Image: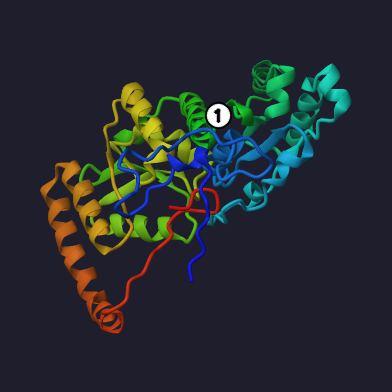
Amino acid sequence: MLEIIETLDERKSSICCNSKDGNKGKMKCDMDSVEGSVSQRACVYCGARVVLNPITDAYHIVHGPIGCAAYTWDIRGSLSSNEEIYRNSFSTDLREQDVIFGGADKLTAAIDEIVEKHSPKLIFVYSTCVVGVIGDDIEAVTKNAREKYNIQVIPVYSSGFAGNKSAGYKAACNALLRLMESAPDSKKAIDIRDSNRFYINYLGDFNLAAEIWILTGYLKKIGIDVVAKITGDSSYEELLKAPTAELNVVQCAGSMTYLAKQMQEKYNIPFIKISFFGIEDTAYSIMDIARASGREEIIQNAKAFISEEINKVKGHLDYYRSKKEVKKAAINVGDENNPI
């Protein structure tokens, strides 16, 4: 017998039931969480870390109490083909005395120590709730560090109480834009490219199960090269080249549509939304990217490639379909914070 669980009034507008008396209106998303020690939604800092953490050679300083840095190791398990430092964080470990007198000196010392021991090219500094309350000027501290060491030290405005996980996505995107703006003139890189190929950025995939490696391989076969993967298995140098792409393709619309729109405005790079979940979506998305290139050879390559790959898996699909004819299945494609 099914147990009937009463829904909190505050949650009803965020639930859609497939029944006669289910809510008919639009389901509310991107709303702030109900206050409490345990939340079904994550904070601004969490959203920022999810986006920026997979940059494989970036260093992350969490400016706040040590507890915030607990959201660190591996986070989502994004895979790397190069550096592994991104799996860790560094914390200023703010305590009561720092709350009273300010923690800017601790942050300066943390940056100095990382530069001395690790010689990084890129450091992100995250503000947390405590920093938002006491008002440490992380803009000034990071600016001084950039001038002192001639490396990119970028503030991420991610005080947890300032919104929700979606606000954290935006904070991360703004940090990425600051990084891209620091890039030198890339015209020479464009001039030496193969004019027969099409160059794109792949936004909103975090390489949780090596999918970026698979999909970039698919695209390469049909004449499309990925300039920057944003941000799964990406690197500092790769992200600097992102403004030279001809098209942005957006997989995770929630985290990356803002960045795509900003890059369209700043760098005149158009974008399309795609999905690589399932065979049909993958086929449609490959064709959409190929058509966006405007090159007939790439379009024909895409058609031939899709036909070839579908034929490879058809026998396997027919086998499993025969076993599941009278069954229904549900697939959770979210994570522990945002199941859908």
Q: Residue at x 54, y 39 (%)?
A: 47
Percent position (x, y) of residue 144?
A: 69, 17
For the point 27% across and 77% down, which residue is it?
A: 317
Query: Does dot 1 land on a helix, a strand or a loop?
Result: loop
Q: How is the image coloured?
A: rainbow
Query: Quick one: which residue is furthest to the right in this view?
Result: 97
In the depicted view, which residue is nearer to us: 265 or 68? 68
For disc 1, the marked residue is 163
| Towards the viewer: 60 or 183 | 60
- Residue 190 visible (yes or no): yes
The image quadrant of residue 262 is top left
Along the line of sight, the residue nearer the viewer: 103 or 13 = 13
Describe residue 301's horizontal placement relative to residue 157 as left or right.
left
Residue 151 left/right relative to 117: left
In the rendered view, tell whether residue 190 sits above or below residue 139: below
**Which residue type does callout 1 highlight?**
Gly
The x and y percentages for residue 82 are: 56, 54
Q: Position of residue 337 (x, y in %)?
A: 54, 49
How many marks overall? 1
Q: Is residue 21 left or right of residue 91?
A: left
Q: Residue at x 33, y 38 (%)?
A: 26
Could you tell whether 202 is left or right of 145 in the image?
left
Query: Is residue 148 visible to the viewer in this orientation of the structure?
Result: no
Q: Nearer the viewer, residue 168 or 161?
A: 161
